Amino acid sequence: ETGVTQSPTHLIKTRGQQVTLRCSSQSGHNTVSWYQQALGQGPQFIFQYYREEENGRGNFPPRFSGLQFPNYSSELNVNALELDDSALYLCASSQDSRRGYTFGSGTRLTVV
Amino acid sequence: GIQVEQSPPDLILQEGANSTLRCNFSDSVNNLQWFHQNPWGQLINLFYIPSGTKQNGRLSATTVATERYSLLYISSSQTTDSGVYFCAVENRDDKIIFGKGTRLHILP
């Protein structure tokens, strides 16, 4: 039982298109983070939201954007998709960072 | 920024063997987690261990925060232990930084 649900599980998009990935966190988890994991690599931090405000960002261009909603769900939006955006996208949430983060199963995005 | 290094990068063992995975980090951290990523990409939390020692069945972990390293021990390995093991630290800005992982392959 992860308590963090991501959708869709798999997605194929064409270069130049836009995509929205979704994450549903456990109730009470005010912090949500998004990660990109390329094949054979560790997850890379994209950004983090706390109580619907972005409070940290990794080395990703502005075409990667996000939203967090009051019902503990969140979105990752990527505009102008590039081939290198093909990766597993992971969402993680936490009620209190001192308790650690719980990850979803991820969305595998393929850009062709 | 903080650097997280895991070793070894790859490890092949016979079923029943013991193993030690290491994670070094370059700066003070707020906390540290060990994850096992299964073949479907799911990151399973093994330990939340900013310091000290914890045990869960055949797995145990030790973090020595003052010396900036953590160890994950797997005893009596089983084929189901195969996968990639990640160490992830939370830096002072509350951001999680992952290492590159140790890919473990247990042979039957």
Image: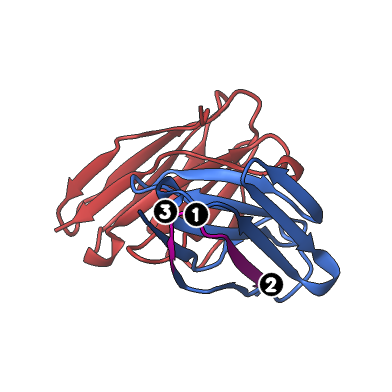
Chain colours: A red, B blue
Few, some or many residues within 10 Å of mark 2 (<14, 14–19, 20+): many
Judged from the image, the secondary structure of the residue bearing numbered disc 2 is strand
Question: How much space separates mark 3 and mark 1, taking CA atoms?
Answer: 12 Å
Q: Nearer the viewer, mark 3 or mark 1?
A: 1
For the residues beneath circles 3 and 2, the answer to whether they share a chain is yes
> Depth check: A68 or B1 in front?
B1
Provide the residue span drawn in magenta.
Answer: B12-24
**In magenta segment, residue B22:** yes
**Kind of residue indicated by mark 2:** Phe
Judged from the image, the secondary structure of the residue bearing numbered disc 3 is loop
Q: Earlier in the sequence, mark 2 or mark 1?
A: 1
A3 horizontally vs B71: left or right: left
Disc number at residue B25? 2
Which residue is drawn at the image coordinates 71% and 62% (left, top)? B91
Which residue is drawn at the image coordinates 44% and 64% (left, top)? B13
Q: Which residue is mark 3?
A: B82
Question: How much space separates mark 2 and mark 1, taking CA atoms?
Answer: 30 Å
**Kind of residue indicated by mark 3:** Ser
Q: Position of residue B6 (x, y in %)?
A: 57, 71
Residue A104 visible in the shown view: yes
| Image mark 3: chain | B
Q: Are marks 3 and 2 in contact (CB under 8 Å)?
A: no
| Image mark 1: chain | B
From what the image shows, is residue A96 above or below residue A27?
below
> Depth check: B108 or A18 in front?
B108
Few, some or many residues within 10 Å of mark 3 (<14, 14–19, 20+): many
**Kind of residue indicated by mark 1:** Gly
Disc number at residue A53? none
**In magenta segment, residue A71:** no
Which residue is drawn at the image coordinates 76% and 61% (left, top)? B63
Q: Which residue is mark 1?
A: B16
